[in-house]
């Protein structure tokens, strides 16, 4: 999906360059918070990935509750849990990521991709960023 077509579908907006987390991504991502973090119990943001962009493997830790929900809104992407096959993502797909599950997500190599990320409230929550998804592995996904 090219940028012009993607922009028509990306109803939640591109947002700003995701510089604060750039070291955990291969490629360029953008972040558009949808709620004021100081005025909400749940953080929601539209995350956009340029073609080929993906985040590192990571885990959402929590002692109770926690995790993350992805609502795919535009373009085409990937989601994968450790030990499982990659899952192709399209608008309308919802991914419920339980706490303590090692995973990654991002755009397909030939498409822009956006999802709304919902940080599920919990106790003692944190994110642990791990190794990159290698170019060799990613480039062979179909």
Image: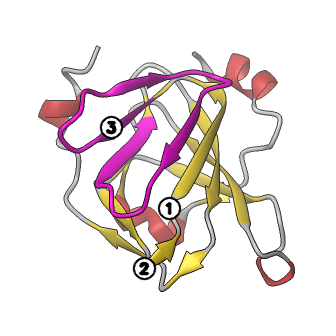
The image position of residue 12, as x and y in percent, is: 80, 42
Q: Element at badge 2?
A: loop
Decide which of 142, 84 is in the foreground and name it.
84
Mark carried by residue 67: 1
Residue at figure coordinates x 31%, y 68% from the top left: 129
Query: How far is disc 3 from disc 1 in space, using C-alphas?
Result: 15 Å
Badge 2: residue crowd in 10 Å (few <14, some 14–19, many ≥20)? few
Q: Is residue 40 left or right of residue 52?
A: right
Q: In whole angstroms, how far apart are the C-alphas of marks 2 and 1? A: 10 Å
Which residue is outermost to the front? 64
- Please name which of the two marks, 3 or 1, marks the residue nearer to the observer: 1
Do tag 2 and tag 1 residues touch (Cβ < 8 Å)?
A: no
Magenta residues span 78-106
What residue sits 42% from the left and 79% below the top? 63
Around disc 1, counting alpha carbons within 10 Å, would you say few (fewer than 14), some (14 to 19), or many (20 or more)? many
The residue that label 3 is drawn on is 80
Does the magenta-highlighted stretch encompass residue 80?
A: yes
Q: Can you name the residue that lies furthest to the left here? A: 136
Count the marks: 3
The residue that mark 2 highlights is 63
């Amino acid at each position: 999906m090219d940028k012009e077509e993607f922009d028509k579908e990306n109803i939640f907006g591109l947002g700003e360059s995701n510089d604060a987390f750039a070291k955990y991504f291969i490629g360029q991502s953008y972040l558009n918070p949808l709620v004021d973090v100081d005025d909400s119990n749940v953080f929601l943001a539209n995350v956009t990935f340029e073609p080929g962009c993906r985040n590192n493997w990571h885990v959402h830790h929590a002692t109770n509750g926690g995790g993350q929900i992805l609502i795919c809104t535009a373009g085409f992407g990937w989601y994968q849990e450790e030990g499982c096959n990659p899952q192709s993502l399209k608008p309308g797909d919802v991914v419920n990521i339980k706490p303590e599950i090692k995973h990654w997500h991002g755009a397909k190599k030939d498409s822009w991709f956006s999802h709304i990320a919902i940080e599920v409230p919990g106790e003692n929550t944190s994110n642990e960023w791990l190794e990159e998804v290698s170019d060799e592995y990613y480039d062979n996904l179909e």
